[in-house]
Amino acid sequence: MITLQPITYDNFADCIRLEPHEHQKKFVASNLFSLAEAYVAMSTETFIPMPFAIYENDVMVGFIMLAYDPAGEDEDDETVYKICRLMIDKNHQGRGFGRRAMEKALEIIRTFPHGKADLVVLSYKPDNEAARSLYSSLGFRETGEVEDDEVWAVLEL
């Protein structure tokens, strides 16, 4: 059974040791970078990070980072939840863990743990067909927006 568990001192080292296959590294930041980004976001109140280790029973198989991003000062800003990262370790891929982790993440988001929002947003590299297929199958639709060489997609809550 897949569970999402907070990153703690007890599992931090295991989390940063996880990595994708070499050819996938261009698609996702390292877990160490992601956790550092979460710390900076939290300390500067840029957004509310929600990093989790993905476990299959008692085995850590991946990492996912969600975020709550309240509307900013720009007119077109809106309050959203984000899927910032999803990474399944190279030794645990191909078993449906990514899909089940995304389903768990969406369950968490739909409880609105940090406040209401109408959308979940995420982005991925245009040539990451595995990500495109997974997110599309979960109901995400591409917006047509490309930022920092990444395609943006949204899911209405």
Image (tube, rainbow, N blue to C red):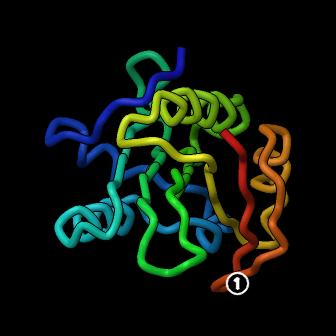
Residue beneath the point at 19% across and 40% down: 8
* Mark 1 surroundings within 10 Å by alpha-carbon count, few (fewer than 14), some (14 through 19), many (20 or more): few
Report the amino acid beneath label 1: Asp
Labels in figure, total: 1
Q: Is label 1 in a helix, a strand or a loop?
A: loop
Can residue 85 be seen here? The reply is: no
Asked if residue 106 lies left or right of residue 61, the reply is: right
Residue 72 lies left or right of residue 110; in this view the side is left
Q: Is residue 156 above or below residue 45?
A: above
Residue 73 location (% of width, % of height): 42, 78
Query: Which residue is at the far front?
Result: 75
The quadrant the N terminus occupies is: top right
Quadrant containing the C terminus in the rendered view: top right
Left or right, 143 with reference to 11: right
Q: Where is residue 33 drawn, in percent x and y? A: 36, 69
Place residue 156 in its image quadrant.
top right
**Snapshot quadrant of residue 39:** bottom left
Q: Is residue 100 visible?
A: yes
Left or right: 137, with 45 as reference point: right
Q: Nearer the viewer, residue 88 or 82?
A: 82
* Residue farthest toward the bottom in the current orientation of the protein: 148
Q: Residue at x 84, y 47 (%)?
A: 136
Identify the residue at image location x=33%, y=55%. 48
Disc 1 target residue: 149
**Residue 17 sits above or below residue 99 on the image:** below
Q: Is residue 125 above or below residue 17?
A: below
* Residue 146 x %, y %: 75, 80
Depth check: 73 or 40 in front? 73
